[in-house]
Amino acid sequence: MDIYVVQQGDSLYGIAQRFGVNADDIYESNGLSDIPYLVVGQALVIPSTETIHTVREGDTLWSIARRYGTTVSEIVALNGITNPEALTPGVTLRIPERSQNYGSIEVNGYIEPSTPEREVKIVREAGEYLTFLSPFSYQVQADGSLKSIDDTAMLNAARKLRIAPLLVITNFANGTFDTALIDGILSDTATQDKLIANVLATLKSKNFYGVNIDFERISPQNRQLYNDFLRRITAALHAQKYVVSTALAPKASDVQTGSWHGAHDYAAHGDIVDFVIIMTYEWGWSGGPPYAVAPVDLVEDVIKYAASVIPSNKIMMGMPLYGYDWTLPYRPGNPWARRLSPQDALKLAAEKGAAIQYNAQTQSPTFRYYDTAGVQHEVWFEDARSVRAKLMLVNKYGLRGVSYWLLGLSFPQNWAVLSNMYNIVKVVP
């Protein structure tokens, strides 16, 4: 697979001819039926089975093989080379596809309840790429009970595709993560006992594979109480052969203050639970100024720190399947930016005649446009290039895998890049 960035004057047919592939395959792989026309700066995945290399002065088969992650014998066989020592500059060589060269990883996807029909559609579309499915969410109550969701359709669809469901429990209430609620539970072991019993009952009754604990905005002074709770629930669930994971706010050092970060003790979580999901997104968020949602430089700062205190094979890196559309000029108190899928971002750029720029530092695409009222907007989103840049961190740091927020947002290029780079582990027989 290749990634090609559309240039002025390009046509789908011309791009296909350049790569020696069928234009229909590019059209299908990129979901171009949703896009009025190609956009300058748009990243296309090219579903080729090989790459073309033009020999340059000084090239050897060994150097070419090393560059593309293949072997001399494979290049020789594919091109019918009879004299490997004689390479003529300007000659083109076919290079075997570098497919799934980076090994095997686990992949989680969060999904929000909607309608049974839509849920099943979402699970089926992403199913082959998922190890875990995490319905969001079962909300903990002050008395230790759980407020459940109707997840029957999505769970049934997941099991047919060998996807292991995770029970997501949160302290989400009234549109936000409730500090007083979770602080009360962490301060009362009797309530914790009831919560653990209810979690176990739900895991058993709905045949979940394990739990994902997403407690946020815990008072920083309750960091140790949270660690103690994790030890208690992990011991109880491990005794029944369930896996335990937690969701962590992103930070690049052991910050012990702040409502989002202070109570999340990376080292302790790495020691206690089976794996962690680090929410490496929302640098650019709907209520703040325009910026990349998951800038790769800042994502790497978090992953580098995490891997220094948590076994890397316990780390799943968060990946966004969305972008934001902000109104300019940005001022605090502006209407919040609207969320949109990467595919909708491309459609918007095409409709508005905007050229897509690619920010080198953040490794993220962005563009500006004017709406019908003459108001300027700024959009940041994800594309095949930004996905690949972040997925390379999984290989660089030896991570367990990645976790997507949020399934159901159209982004076909993501799945093409993911499956081209990695084999997806299935833990359900």
Image (cartoon, helix red, strand yellow):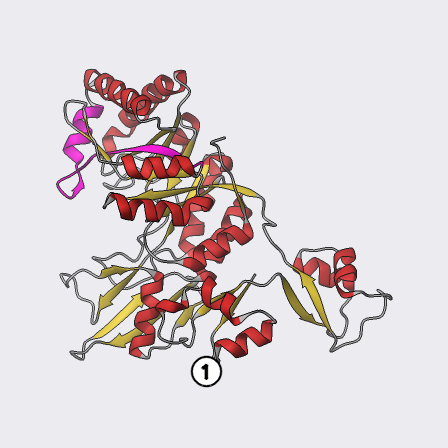
Tell me the kind of residue under disc 1. Answer: Gln
In this orientation, which residue lies closer to the viewer: 220 or 100? 100
The span picked out in magenta is 162-186
Residue situated in front as seen by the camera: 232 or 93: 93
Label 1 crowd (10 A; few <14 / some 14-19 / many >=20): few
* Vertical position of residue 251 compared to residue 352: above or below: above
Question: Percent x, y for residue 394?
Answer: 50, 47
The verdict on residue 181 being magenta is yes
Rendered image quadrant of residue 75: bottom right
**Residue 194 shown left or right of residue 422 in the figure:** left
Question: Is residue 333 left or right of 43 when viewed as pictured?
Answer: left
The part of the image, by quadrant, that contains residue 348 is bottom left
Q: Is residue 209 left or right of residue 168?
A: right
Q: Kindly give the residue lying farthest to the bottom in the view shown.
A: 9
Residue 405 makes an appearance in the image: no
From the top left corner, tell me how far across and down residue 90 is, in percent. 73, 78
Q: Is residue 146 visible?
A: yes
Q: Which residue is mark 1?
A: 8
Determine if the magenta segment contains residue 391.
Answer: no
Q: Quadrant of residue 83?
A: bottom right
The one of 205 and 99 positioned closer to us in this rendering = 205
Kindly identify the residue that appears in the image at 34 percent across and 38 percent down: 134
Q: Position of residue 402 (x, y in %)?
A: 44, 44
The residue under the point 19% across, 25% down is 185
Residue beneath the point at 29% across and 41% down = 261
Task: Judge whether 301 appears above or below 84 on screen.
Answer: above
